[in-house]
Amino acid sequence: MGFFPLFSSLDSSKDSLCLYEDCSEFLPWLQQKAGDEISSFLSVGTSTYGRSLFASRFIQAGDCILKVPYSVQITPDNIHPDIGFFLSDDVGNVVRLALVVLAEQKIGQDSGWAHYINSLPQIGELHSTIFWSEDELEMVRQSPIYQETLTHKAFIEKEFLKVIPALEQFLQKFEDTTLESFMHAYALVGSRAWGTSKGLSLIPFADFLNHDGVSETVLLSDEGKQISEAIADRDYDSGDQVFISYGKFSNATLLLDFGFYPSL
């Protein structure tokens, strides 16, 4: 999931294959961690949306373009048991996964997930309306997205209050955690995590795929093989940007949760 500009159209003709320097080692690292090949079809590049995935060779509809083992996915189960002990039962999976992200960010380069955590957008790089300034929100005051944004921000603030007792028990992991950093981690999970048979998962590499509202490619779970995989819904020539569907969402939801709004 790249950094989508607002009011953008999904026009892949503006894409260009230009490898991100900070991601040049990402796929080799992930494949080493997984102990298996993730994809022989895709490479990381840039587009008008930011980080994207491109066909590194011809892809035919029906090809399995990526396979990410459950073992390299981050789920709420990755939260340290001691931290989980201090969380009430009404703390949901998005919050628990956000706390995992915050804890791994604190560990830094010593984290076993450092390559992935470092690839995530930093504070100030997400475009969800919950991060808009008051002046920016005024532009959509007459739209339902205005009240939805205020309601969503208030909900995240309440979720933050729920976990403060746990954060205070583990200051070595969360001493720098503020409402701003929590909201950022919450939005990362909300915009990038996938619903899987494991519940909710951050799936490295798969979340570099950008959304196309007409794509029929979705992320699938294979319990037998213990992997998440994506099957191409169309042919792609080498160098084409490859897309996936995040789901059938309204434009307002895309703007609130993902920070982009497809043009008509």
Image (cartoon, grey):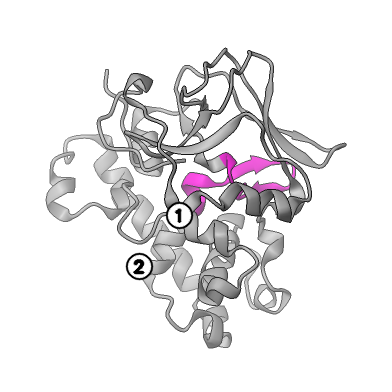
> What residue do we see at 49% from left, 78% from top?
164
Classify mark 1: residues with Cα within 10 Å, few (<14), some (14-19) or many (20+): few
User: Is residue 148 something that shows in the picture?
Assistant: yes
Task: Please give left or right for residue 100 compared with residue 160 in the image.
Answer: right
Q: Residue 142 appears at what percent x and percent y?
A: 17, 36
Quarter where residue 36 is shown:
top right
Depth order, front residue of 38/98: 38
Looking at the image, residue 166 lies above or below residue 162:
below
Quarter where residue 138 is shown:
top left
Quadrant location, the C terminus: top left
> What residue do we see at 43% from left, 51% from top?
21
Q: Residue 229 appears at what percent x and percent y?
A: 70, 33
Depth order, front residue of 218/60: 60
Alpha carbon distance from label 1 to label 2: 25 Å
Residue, disc 1: 22
Q: Secondary structure at mark 1?
A: helix
Looking at the image, residue 125 lies above or below residue 138:
below
Task: Please give left or right for residue 84 compared with residue 263 in the image.
Answer: right
- In the image, the segment drawn in magenta is 189-206
Task: Please give left or right for residue 151 compared with residue 235 in the image.
Answer: left
Q: Earlier in the sequence, mark 1 or mark 2?
A: 1
Residue, disc 2: 180
Tag 1: residue type? Asp
